[in-house]
Image (cartoon, rainbow, N blue to C red):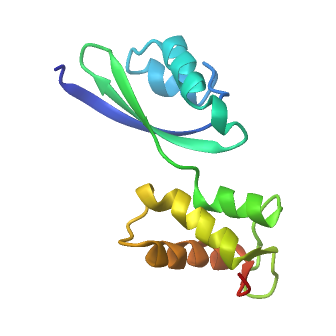
Amino acid sequence: MAKIKTVIKLQIKAGEANPAPPVGPALGQHGLNIQEFCTKFNAATQDKRGNIIPVEITVFEDRSFDFFLKTPPASDLLKKAAGIEKGSANTPKQKAGKVTKQQVREIAELKMPDLNANDVEAAIKIIEGTAKSMGITVENKV
């Protein structure tokens, strides 16, 4: 197995990776085949179009690479669920939107692999905290 040279972390729209910044310069400086990465990433994320997908690219010394996809950021999933463009600029005074307890549960279940939570209930609290910081109200009805 080749030795690991570095790990690159990027957030790219699913199915839309191309050699333009930020992908090209980040991979090019490590001598990777940028087009090969874009092709593989786009194929792997084709079914997730519309979401931003965080990706961890492990670069090896022989210029080969491996990548690992993560779940979309909680803030993106919350914005979609609430049907808003962006969170509130002034969270205590101004609310940006609303989500139901059920939507929060679905987001928490989707995010479970990437969250530092032991169970879904703990994950729900993390997602609710993100919603609160964005000015999104969580309605208690299920």
Q: Residue furthest front?
A: 142
**Is 83 positioned to the left or the right of 26 in the image?**
right
Say left or right for 26 vs 80. left
- 132 is higher (above) or lower (below) than 70: below
Q: Work out whether 86 lies above or below 3.
A: below
The image quadrant of residue 115 is bottom left
**Looking at the image, can residue 13 be seen?**
yes
Is residue 96 or residue 128 the one in the foreground? Answer: 128
Q: Position of residue 50 (x, y in %)?
A: 73, 41
| Residue 128 drawn above or below residue 41 | below
In the image, taking residue 119 as reference, residue 76 lies left or right, namely right
Q: How many marks are shown on the rendered structure?
A: 0
Which sits in the foreground, 3 or 102? 102
Residue depicted at 56% across the width and 16% down the height: 39
- The answer, for residue 14, to whether it is visible in the render is no
Identify which residue is drawn at 50% across, 13% down: 36
Q: Residue 135 sits in which quadrant?
A: bottom right
* Residue at the spot 38% in from the left edge and 66% down from the top edge: 116
| Position in image of residue 26 (x %, y %) | 48, 28
- Locate the N terminus and report the quarter of the image it occupies: top left
Q: Nearer the viewer, residue 130 or 19?
A: 130
Q: Is residue 8 above or below residue 20?
A: below
Residue 106 appears at what percent x and percent y?
61, 65
Q: Is residue 114 left or right of residue 86?
A: left
Q: Quadrant of the C terminus?
A: bottom right
